[in-house]
Amino acid sequence: MKIVIVGCGKVGSSIARELNTGEHDISVVDNNRTAVTRLADSLDVLGIEGNGATYDVLAEAGVEDADLVIAATARDEVNLYACLMARAAGVPHTIARVRSPEYTDDLYRVKDQLRLSMSINPELTEAIEISRLLRFSGALEIDSFSKGAVELIKFQIPESSVLVGKRISQIDTLRGKVRVCTIERGRDVYIAMGDTVIEAGDKVSIVSKPDIATKFFKKAGISIGRCRDVILLGGGKVSFYLAQKLLKSGVNVKIIEHNAARCEELAESLHDAIIIHGDCMDQELLMSEGVDQADGVVALMDYDEENILISLYIQSVSKAKVITKVNNPSFDTIIDKLGLECVINPKTLTGEYIARYIRAMQNSMGSNVESLYRLHEDRVEALEFRAKEGSRSTETPLSELSLKDELQVICIARSGKVILPQGSDMIVPGDSVVVITKQKGLSDLDDILVKR
């Protein structure tokens, strides 16, 4: 696909990196020459300096031949206008980054007039992801497939769990309703097999329906319950969106924010939340506000360094689930060594969401990947395919298929029913099929098979 990305800031750069897989022809546009040059040199994409909301600059970037324009500058109005200009140039698909809560709430009224294919709000996206993690307080990651019917949940095995020392084949997974998919042990990642033994400290991913997963965790002696009392550190847009979602689900929410004017705004908008004016780095204040008794604490301040430091402190004084916002991807190698429980990068999330939308577009254009999640630091992929007529993978028991090594078919969705397949199960045309693998470059369901 030919893709033009307007805006080379953190979000635009993240999107470009996510899409720079070799299958797309990418151009990036920005007024900032340094930003354009840096991104173009690091990713080997075409860089254009200029105002991406003007026709001449878009034309220089190749908009007349583009399949998609993504506008991700810092200004919502510029993004919407750039998409409108791209549509006028004949681009069939446009995506706009829209951050303002007011615009986000009203955008559905004019989406058809603007002919937007998709709008994305990075802060709202981050809030959605965090709210899902707080639903299962012990989860490290949660990804959904088959329109939310099943979830891939990553968690850590405590020493007290009854799963420790057992082979996968020995685990009663609620009569086939839960499947163990991957095991991360230190720096190694394994696709789970029947003879794989679980050890304390392993990070394990399972696939299941959300309600069944709850029963599994309880039976396995793993504390992974819902957070009921949550403290948000920082009162920015993410906190606002997250508080809205948590309050609707009956969670008690407290927000600590250093800016008095912002505290007043939050108090006016979030009537059921407790708003505290104070310094989020003040340990005495945090303790007085019950950080040691909370079920969940989310560090959402403006500076990554503050979020990291205060998260480490909270982990030392509280059993709360601690979620840390980190914008700078260059901190990843350091974070791995610090032992932070759960880290969210909003820019990366935005890139991943847009990449999923593009894969759905490609599916309608001949590709067969409906969803893709990169797991375990990009060493494992979970992909969702749609089974088509004539596929070599259909109408044959899974036990008789020559599947590639380090690959597992973990879920089949058929007419609203979720199947965690056994060897005797078959894929039939029309099924939604989820596989998890360390193999890269799968683009069709038949790619799960060893080539003849």
Image: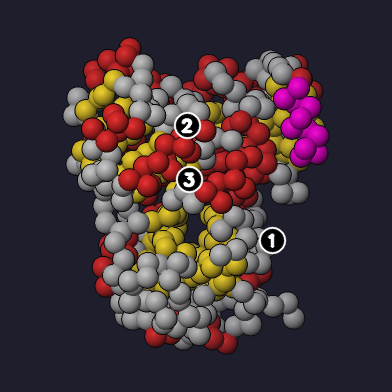
Q: Can you identify the residue that label 1 sits on?
A: 441
Task: Look at the image and give the residue range highlighted in magenta.
Answer: 34-44
- Image quarter where the N terminus lies is top right
Q: Amino acid under label 2?
A: Glu
Does 423 sit left or right of 10 as displayed?
left
Front-most of residues 446 and 157: 157
Instruction: Examine the structure image and report whether residue 177 is included in the region drawn in magenta.
Output: no
- Of circles 2 and 3, which is in front? 2
Q: Residue at (71%, 44%) from the top-left corner? A: 20
Check residue 343 in the rendering and tell me which mark sits there, or answer none. 3
Label located before the other in sequence (2 or 3): 2
Cα distance between the residues tagged 2 and 3: 13 Å
Q: Residue at (35%, 56%) from the top-left corner? A: 138
- Of circles 3 and 1, which is in front? 3
Front-most of residues 230 and 294: 294
- Image quarter where the C terminus lies is bottom right
Instruction: Tally the marks.
Output: 3
Q: Residue furthest front?
A: 284
In this picture the colour scheme is secondary structure
Label located before the other in sequence (1 or 2): 2
Q: Residue at (30%, 31%) from the top-left corner? A: 284
Q: Amino acid under label 1?
A: Gly
Front-most of residues 242 and 15: 242
Q: Amino acid under label 3?
A: Val
Residue 252 place in picture, x, y as percent: 21, 38
Q: Can you identify the residue that label 2 sits on?
A: 306
What kind of element bears circle 3? strand
Residue 381 place in picture, x, y as percent: 58, 61
